[in-house]
Image (cartoon, rainbow, N blue to C red):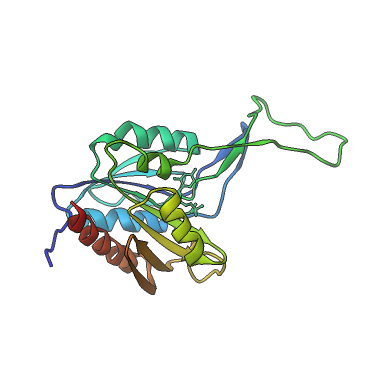
Amino acid sequence: PKARPLAGLRLMLTAGPTREALDPVRYISNHSSGKMGFALAAAAQALGAAVTLVSGPVSLATPAGVQRVNVESAQNMYDAVMAGIEEQQIFIACAAVADYAPKMVASHKIKKTRADNMVVELIKNPDIVASVAALPRKPFTVGFAAETRDVEKYALDKLERKNLDMIAANDVSGSDRGFNSDQNALSVFWPGGRQHLPLAGKTELAEQLLTLIANRYHETH
Ligand code: PMT
C-alpha cells in the first residue's frame, strides 16, 4: 500500500462537542473531548491530506500542519463546514453535534424564580453530515454513530438515511471507550462491506479508519 494514500486530497472533519446557549452564561452540551476527531485530523495529515478541522470547544492542541476553525454551536459548525465544503474531496463528521438547541436564547442571565419547574423549548439543529451528503457535488462522506444499544441496526439506518459513503459506529454506553476515553472500538460499515476495528488507542484507531477510508475512496473514484 502507498505510504501517503491521501496525498493531493483535501479532507475536512468536525470534532468535539457543540454548545447551545441558554443565556450568556449557560449552555447545553455533551461529553465529547475531541480526542477521536483530533486523532483523525493528525492521521489524515500524516497520510498526505490537506486537513481542515472544524472544532467545537475542546482543550486540545491543534495537530501540526492542520488548519483549524473554532466554533461553538451546531449552527456555527454548519456555517463553517458549508463555507469550505466545495473544495473538499473527503468529509468526516466526528463531532457530537447537539440535535436540538434552545428556541430562545435569553440576552441576560436567566433569573431564579419562585416556581419549582422550568420548561425550555428546543428546536432541531441542521444536520451537518446529512446536508453535506445532499450536496450536488458531494464529497466522500463519512459519518459516526454514537449509540448505547443496537449499534449495528442504528448505524446501518444512519448510513442509508443520511446517504453516507461510510459510517463508523461506536458503543458509548461504557466508560472504557467512546466519549472522553483515550480508547475506542469502531464498527465500520459501507454499502456492501464492513470491518470491525477492536478496542485500541484513538491514535491507532484513527490510522486504521483512515486506511479504510482511503481504500474505499480510491475504489469509488
Ligand atoms: O470526542 P471524544 O471524547 O474523543 O469522543 C468521540 C465520539 C464518541 C464523540 C465520536 O467517536 C462519535 O461517536 N462522534 C459522533 C457523535 C454523535 O453525535 O453521533 P450521532 O449518532 O448523534 O450522530 C450521527 C452523525 O451525524 C455523526 O457523524 C454526527 O457528527 C452527525 N451529526 C449529528 C447531528 C447534527 N445536527 N449534525 C451532524 O452532522
Count of numbered badges drawn on the protein: 0
Q: Is residue 110 left or right of residue 14?
A: right
Which one is in front, 43 or 6?
A: 6
Tell me the quarter of the picture where residue 44 sits.
bottom left
Note whether 150 is above or below 97 in the view shown: below
Residue 7 in the image: above or below residue 203: above
Q: Quadrant of the N terminus?
A: bottom left
Q: Nearer the viewer, residue 113 or 7?
A: 7
Percent x, y of residue 18: 50, 43
At 36% from the left and 37% from the top, the residue drawn is: 81
Residue 125: image x %, image y %? 53, 37
Q: Residue furthest top?
A: 107
Q: Is residue 128 visible?
A: yes
Q: Residue at x 59, y 35 (%)?
A: 21
In the image, farthest residue toward the bottom: 198
Identify the image quadrant of residue 212: bottom left
In x, y percent, where is residue 135?
Answer: 33, 37
Task: Write the residue at 32% across / 53% down.
Answer: 165
- Residue, far left: 2
Residue 34 visible (yes or no): no
Q: In the figure, 207 relative to 113: above or below? A: below
Q: Position of residue 179 (x, y in %)?
A: 50, 60
139 and 28: which is toward the camera: 139
For the point 22% across and 53% down, the residue is 45
